[in-house]
Image: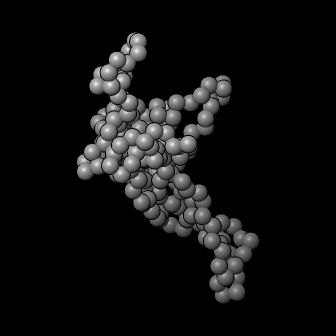
Amino acid sequence: MKFEPDLLGFGYKGRHTNIYADVETQTVTQELLGEPVELRATPQEFHWDYGDGATRTTYEPGESLPDYDGTGQEIVKTDFETVTSHVYEETGIYPVTVETVYTGEFRVGDGEWRDIPGTVSVESSPGEADIWTQNSRWVSGACESAELWGCNGPIEFDPATDRPPKIYQDQYDENGHWLGPVK
């Protein structure tokens, strides 16, 4: 289970957070009684648990978003709907998992592939969706006081109760004070 690589699970309340399964067909070859035997496990279904009570089943694993759509427009990765994305209605940190259901086949030598009855389910390690709210206001003119809204820079975190989102952690010290963008 993965989040957008450049967002690391960060998302906004009320917007799409893209989550996808990093899976592929697995093939293993072993020798049995002097003959090569191949086993193939193919992902078929994905049971998503978004951590906020919402679940979904898809038949596609999803994927990381490209930077641009087919028309050359930049994709807003903090709000782009995909088959596996989810909209969180509240802020918070949510444990996200996906259970992947595999079907199996086998063949001996260069023979035909044969189905193995049943399925196997594998649950991912949980990831964390770190959902925040976004507030903005229009301001005009130069800041006259650092105490005024919009003039005091990024927020300060209380290290006992808060943490910056993973994508911004390198911009804060261990006491929750903003250091600025790391260059």
> In the rendering, at what x and y percent does residue 36 appear?
70, 79
Q: Quadrant of the C terminus?
A: top right
Q: Residue at x 71, y 71 (%)?
A: 111
Q: Residue furthest front?
A: 144
Compared across the picture, whether 125 is left or right of 68 comes to left
Q: Residue at x 47, y 58 (%)?
A: 101
> In the rendering, at what x and y percent does residue 166 appear?
43, 47
Q: Along the line of sight, which residue is nearer the eye, 29 or 165? A: 165
Is residue 53 at all visible to an observer of this figure?
no
Q: Is residue 106 above or below residue 35?
A: above
Residue 55 image-quadrant placement = top left
Q: Residue furthest bottom?
A: 33
Compared across the picture, whether 90 is left or right of 98 comes to left
Q: Is residue 49 above or below residue 34?
A: above
Compared across the picture, whether 113 is left or right of 83 comes to right
Is residue 80 at all visible to an observer of this figure?
yes
Q: Residue at x 33, y 35 (%)?
A: 155
> In the rendering, at what x and y percent does residue 180 appear?
45, 39
Residue 35 image-quadrant placement = bottom right
Q: Residue at x 38, y 15 (%)?
A: 139
Q: Residue furthest left?
A: 161
Q: Along the line of sight, which residue is nearer the eye, 74 or 139? A: 139
Q: Along the line of sight, which residue is nearer the eye, 118 or 140? A: 140
